[in-house]
Image (spheres, rainbow, N blue to C red):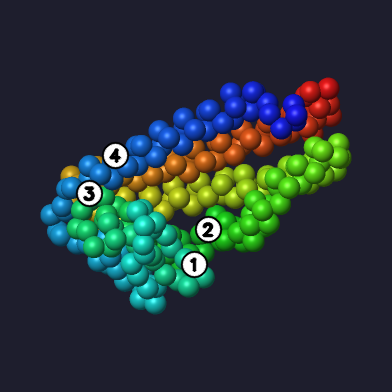
C-alpha cells in the first residue's frame, strides 16, 4: 500500500498545488468582483468590446455568443467563435471588457497564425489521450512492477504538462494584446487600463498555478519510479 499513499506526494505536490490554485482563484474572483462594479466611461459591454477588436482586424466572420457559467469565457478556433459568460457578455464593466478583449486576443492570434496557439491546438488530441490513460498506466505499472508501463504512464502525463506549458505564452500574449488594444481602439480610457491589467494579471496566475502543480507531479513520478535516476525512490 506504500505505493498508493505517500506523505511526500501530499507535502510536495498536493499541498503546494492547493495553495497556489486557491490563491490564484481567490485573486481572480476578488479582482473580477471589484472591477465588475466599475462601469467604463465609454459604456461598451463585453460583447461590444470584443466585436470592436475583431472588426478592427477584419475578423467579421468570428461570431460572439453568450455562454453559461461563471467566467466560462473562451475562444473556439474550430468554430471561430467567442463564447462569453453572462457576466462578461452583457456587462459594461472594466472587468467584463478586459476578459472579452482577452478572448478576442485569441481570435486575433488565430488569424495571425500565432505559433504557440497552433501548437496548443495540435496538442489537444494527444492531451485527451494522455489525461485519460496516464493514471491507468501508472496503476498497472505499480501493481505489476512493470517499468515500461510506468514509463508510458509518465510520458502520457507529460503530454498534459507540455500542453500547460504551451498554454502560458498563449494566455500571456492574449492578455498583452487586450491590455494594449482596448486603449488603442478607445474601448477604455488610459486611466481605466489599470483595472483591466489587474483582472487579466490575476487570471494569468491560474494558468501558472496549474502548470507548476502538474510539473511538480511529473517530477514526483520521475523520482518515485526511478525514471530520473534509474532507481526507485522506495527501494
Nearest the camera: 20 or 45?
Answer: 20
Nearest the camera: 186 or 123?
Answer: 123
Nearest the camera: 149 or 228?
Answer: 149
| Residue 223 position by quadrant | top right
Measure the alpha-carbon separation of dots 3 and 2: 28 Å
Q: Position of residue 192 (x, y in %)?
A: 19, 47
Measure the alpha-carbon separation of dots 3 and 1: 27 Å
Q: Is residue 174 above or below residue 197?
A: below
Disc 2: which residue:
117
Q: Earlier in the sequence, mark 3 or mark 1?
A: 3
Q: Position of residue 176 (x, y in %)?
A: 38, 49
Q: Is residue 91 above or below residue 11?
A: below
| Residue 62 position by quadrant | bottom left
Side (left or right) of 27 relative to 75: left
Q: Mark 3: which secondary structure?
A: loop
Nearer mark to the viewer, of 3 and 1: 3
Nearest the camera: 22 or 95?
Answer: 22
Side (left or right) of 101 relative to 135: left
- Rendered-image quadrant of the N terminus: top right
Q: Is residue 80 above or below residue 160?
A: below
Disc 3: which residue:
36
Say whether marks 2 and 4 touch (CB < 8 Å). no
Tell me the crowding category of disc 1: few under 14, some 14 to 19, or many 20 or more residues within 10 angstroms, Cα based: some
Disc 1: which residue:
77
Q: Earlier in the sequence, mark 2 or mark 4?
A: 4
Measure the alpha-carbon separation of dots 4 and 3: 10 Å
Labelled disc at residue 30: 4
Identity of the residue drawn at 56% across and 36% down: 213
Amino acid at each position: 500500500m506504500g505505493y498508493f499513499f505517500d506523505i511526500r506526494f501530499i507535502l510536495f505536490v498536493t499541498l503546494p498545488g492547493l495553495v497556489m490554485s486557491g490563491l490564484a482563484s481567490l485573486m481572480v474572483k476578488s479582482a473580477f468582483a471589484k472591477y465588475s462594479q466599475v462601469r467604463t466611461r465609454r459604456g461598451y459591454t463585453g460583447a461590444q468590446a470584443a466585436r470592436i477588436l475583431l472588426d478592427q482586424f477584419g475578423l467579421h466572420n468570428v461570431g460572439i455568443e453568450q455562454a453559461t457559467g461563471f467566467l466560462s469565457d473562451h475562444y473556439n478556433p474550430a468554430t471561430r467563435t467567442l463564447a462569453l459568460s453572462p457576466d462578461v457578455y452583457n456587462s459594461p464593466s472594466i472587468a467584463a471588457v478586459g476578459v472579452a478583449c482577452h478572448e478576442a486576443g485569441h481570435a486575433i492570434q488565430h488569424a495571425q497564425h500565432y505559433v504557440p496557439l497552433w501548437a496548443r491546438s495540435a496538442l489537444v488530441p494527444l492531451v485527451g489521450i494522455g489525461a485519460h490513460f496516464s493514471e491507468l498506466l501508472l496503476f498497472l505499472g505499480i501493481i505489476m512492477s512493470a517499468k515500461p508501463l510506468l514509463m508510458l504512464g509518465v510520458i502520457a502525463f507529460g503530454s498534459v504538462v507540455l500542453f500547460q506549458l504551451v498554454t502560458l505564452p498563449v494566455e500571456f500574449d492574449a492578455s498583452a494584446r487586450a491590455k494594449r488594444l482596448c486603449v488603442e481602439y478607445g474601448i477604455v480610457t488610459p486611466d481605466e487600463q489599470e483595472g483591466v491589467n489587474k483582472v487579466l494579471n490575476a487570471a494569468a496566475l491560474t494558468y501558472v498555478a496549474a502548470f507548476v502543480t502538474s510539473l511538480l507531479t511529473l517530477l514526483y513520478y520521475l523520482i518515485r519510479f526511478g525514471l530520473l535516476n534509474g532507481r526507485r525512490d522506495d527501494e
